[in-house]
Image (cartoon, coloured by chain):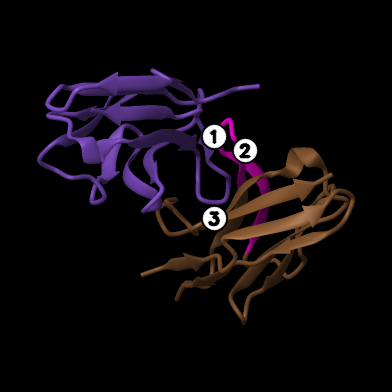
Chain colours: A purple, B brown
Amino acid sequence: DARVTQTPRHKVTEMGQEVTMRCQPILGHNTVFWYRQTMMQGLELLAYFRNRAPLDDSGMPKDRFSAEMPDATLATLKIQPSEPRDSAVYFCASGTDRRQPQHFGDGTRLSIL
Amino acid sequence: AQTVTQSQPEMSVQEAETVTLSCTYDTSESDYYLFWYKQPPSRQMILVIRQEAYKQQNATENRFSVNFQKAAKSFSLKISDSQLGDAAMYFCAYNTSGSRLTFGEGTQLTVNP
């Protein structure tokens, strides 16, 4: 079965450090999403791309978060500088069109000390 | 803004019994898609079932079925013959324009042996 691959699976680092999370979408999927899951906010959309172009990043704190898609097989989410409130599980998902379900990666559990 | 509400933070069911999880949503769109995702302790997001708003027939997938009431904006999930492996957090999600998913708060389902 095709899968969305996320790395790393876990990340623990100190506040102020740069964090980079990576995602390999399913081959042939042209839309990539980044979601964040916390106990307080639940699952919320941070940003998404279609055909590698950013369509919406309104859910991201612009001053510290950035999302890119350097090629069709790689999406990245960076946090610089990281803060303890960024601690969460970050999911990448990929899909084709709104009629089809999104496929999620296993998530990156991020802990900022 | 579109919202999705799951009014039951927790539910429990006896093994082999039936349970229904509730979900309501708010939208001004006429064409949209609804999903139920399951998140076990492994934190994977697994698609359970999908419903297209323009279809009146309720979707079914083996032991899982939905009761879709478009006028009432209700989309409940019924799990029949509950199994221990069904224990998980269940999220209702609405697919807005642009393919982004809006999630409910989740319902934690416990299956008692």
For label 3, the residue is B106
Q: At numbered mark 3, what does the secondary structure look like: helix, strand or loop? A: loop
Give how far across and how far down residue B21 sits, in percent: 68, 62
Give how far across and how far down residue A24 sits, in percent: 43, 21
Q: Amino acid at mark 2?
A: Pro
Q: Amino acid at mark 1?
A: Arg
For label 2, the residue is B40
Name the image quarter holding the C terminus of chain B. top right
Task: Locate residue A72 relative to residue B40 in the image: left or right.
Answer: left
Does B65 appear above or below B56? above
Give how far across and how far down residue B85 sits, in percent: 76, 38
Q: Residue at x 12, y 26 (%)?
A: A16
Q: Which residues are magenta?
A: B38-52
Q: Amino acid at mark 3?
A: Gly
In the rendered structure, which disc, 1 or 3, sits on the residue that comes first in sequence? 1
Q: At numbered mark 2, what does the secondary structure look like: helix, strand or loop? A: loop
**Answer yes or no: do the residues labelled 3 and 2 have beta carbons within 8 Å?**
no
For label 1, the residue is B43
* Same-chain check, marks 1 and 3: yes
Task: Locate residue B10 relative to residue A41 in the image: left or right.
Answer: right
**Answer yes or no: do the residues labelled 2 and 1 have beta carbons within 8 Å?**
yes
Q: Residue at x 36, y 48 (%)?
A: A45
Disc 1 crowd rating (10 Å Cα; few below 14, some 14-19, many 20+) is some
Instruction: Please say whether residue A14 is visible from this viewpoint.
Output: yes
In the rendered structure, which disc, 3 or 2, sits on the residue that comes first in sequence? 2
Q: Is residue B29 magenta?
A: no
Task: Locate residue B33 relative to residue A80 in the image: left or right.
Answer: right
Rounded to the nearest angstrom, the CA distance separating label 3 from label 2 is: 12 Å
